[in-house]
Image (cartoon, coloured by chain):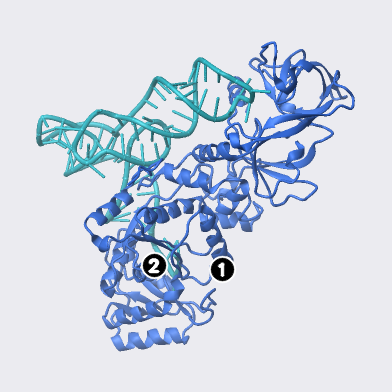
Chain colours: A blue, B cyan
Amino acid sequence: MAASPSPAPSNFVRDIILDDLKTNKYEARVQTRFPPEPNGYLHIGHAKAICLDFGLADEFGGKTNLRFDDTNPEKEETEYVDSIQEDVKWLGFHWDGLFYASDYFDQLYQWAVKLIKAGKAYVDDLSAEEIRKHRGTLTEPGEDSPYRSRSLEENLDLFERMKAGEFPDGSRVLRAKIDMASPNLNMRDPVMYRILHAEHHRTGNKWCIYPMYDFAHGQSDSLERVTHSMCTLEFEDHRPLYNWFIEQLEIFPSRQIEFDRLNLTYTQLSKRKLLQLVEQKHVSGWDDPRMPTLSGIRRRGYTPEAIRNFCKAIGVSKTNGSIELAMLEHFVREDLNKRAPRAMAVLRPLKVVIDNYPQNQVEEMDAVNNPEDATAGTREIPLSRVLYIERDDFREDPPKGYYRLSPGREVRLRYGYLVTCTGVVKNEKDEVIEVHCTYDPATRGGNTPDGRKVKSTIHWVSAAHAIDAEVRLYQTLFTKEDPNDTKDGEDFTVNLNPQSLEVRNSAKLEPSLKNAPAGSRYQFERLGYFCVDLDSTPGKPVFNRTVALKDTWAKVEKKNQPPRN
RNA sequence: UGGGCCGUCGACUAAUGGUAGGUCAAGUGCCUUUGGAGCACUUUGUCUAGGUUCGAAUCCUAGCGGCCCAGCCA
């Protein structure tokens, strides 16, 4: 066994599998499944589950099925089925079998009949409301339904007629006969089947009764001979029921193991609430780059490698916690730093005129594409008398510690020349609209033959050669670490960040970016990582900022000037 | 206040009765044609109280704190 370069840290699920392997449980076989309900798009929380399910099976030479948990025809759609498959593949995983819980509807029906015949299930005529009342409370036991003691024959007949469509929605259900006094509410005669005259995305109108999650999930695991069935913590209370059905049915004993779901600061990971954001148009869609969906994150410019590394780093446990968003951002920076070619782009242009530079001269300056990757090569960038620099890179009255351009000060233009600011031009509102400089011809390429040092190197683009672009800058979608932290009666949308999207319409890019294809990623020097959006048009590219570079100066400035409000 | 689960640096996670370690964050310095990247160093932790033991983050007891469960959702 070769030592892996970055060994996956162990976790309690892996320990369980290791132990089962040692004791030869399941004939030393490892099989998992990733079981999404196709009622929404996959998000970063699912990525954690995917990495666990597929990762563990891969590690032990096992199999992983993709199985759609499609037992509720009213919420599920093929659009979601398609996006989920695309996202799993994009993340870099390959499933063995592709299944649907609905593939098992016939088998499930037969098993339900088997339980009725064994006296372990009955048809209940109580309404939903009445069932709720009979269920008792957290501290008081429930009461038996008056229909609990029906004869086998009557139960069989009624269940068959439920299937045949003789009864309206909600009029009857099939229930497991377990224990109405159980302290675990899931064991108080849980509903197995409900009547739903609804068209199913796969089975069409074949069925008008549909199994509940509890009477489908474990059985599906068992049918596929899944050995280790990982799910999130809220299903711990369902495990006794999961096992009860397997025992009563005498089928393959898959084992359910629960782990902690991912929580990320400043991020909403409830599928229902993500759907709400889409439906109420707080975002442009499931793939809005501010969304934590895999499609949103992908459009934002994240790489699958970064997400996988993140999932590996956060680990798996049973502790309810919240990962800091900075952790995710670290892993995308780490990955993009190695692979993203550099380019120069000015987001808020300020015109610079180099007064002593020849009027119509243009020089091609050599620039390295990626200092982290010697094989990435170099490119040429045109320089001329009129440039744009970042507004932030000039201050008429520089604060302490600021060492970019200001009157009388010399800085280096990256891959260009050293320039010294000689003056400014202002408009009637006293705003600087133009900066004047002189350059030192001896410093071509940014070199200083005399060994002189400058404190700062800034990026620039030649005005005559620049490409106009739209750049979209993002902040967190929510202003609070916990978006669900609201006052009574308030919806989580009150925590939406009004500044989560900022569009810069007049960005100027170096000409090499002209034909960058959608999805390609760059580091704009000194600014951050950016990704070409699919809204780009031939005349005007659109870039998304994936994540900003770490900005030491911004930190210093913030510390020196605490917020006024 | 019925049942289930969980408490280790600011965050996440290891240590499986035997040196409390790693990553992120924060801080300091070095270096730098990105105030980027990199490198070095530093700060901070076993929820509390008892008990078992030569030895406890780990085992036991009792507290305290947090999360989940009363859908014909998953």
* Residue at (44% x, 67% y) in the render: A97
Q: Is residue A509 visible?
A: no
Q: Which mark is residue A250?
A: none
Q: Position of residue A418 (x, y in %)?
A: 74, 18
Q: Which mark is residue A217?
A: 2
Quadrant housing the C terminus of chain A: top right
- The three-letter code of the residue at mark 2 reads His
Residue drawn at (51%, 57%) of the image: A88
On the question of residue A415 being in view, the answer is yes
Which circle's residue, 1 or 2, is located before the other in the chain?
1
Q: Please state if A430 lies on the left or on the right of A516 as rendered.
A: right
User: From the viewer's perspective, is A362 left or right of A171?
Assistant: right
- Is disc 1 surrounded by few (<14), some (14 to 19) or many (20+) residues within 10 Å? some
Relative depth, front residue between A105 and A563: A105
* Left or right: A282 in relation to A461: left
Image quadrant where residue B56 sits: top left
Q: Are marks 1 and 2 on the same chain?
A: yes
- x and y percentages locating residue A474 in the rendered image: 64, 41
- Which subunit holds the residue at mark 2? A
Report helix, strand or loop for mark 2. Answer: helix
In the rendering, which numbered label is found on residue A77?
Answer: 1
Task: Tell me how far mark 1 sits from mark 2, CA to CA.
Answer: 19 Å
Residue type, label 1: Glu
The location of residue A397, given as percent across then percent down, is 73, 16
> In front: A95, or B7?
A95
Q: Residue at x 56, y 50 (%)?
A: A491
Chain under disc 1:
A
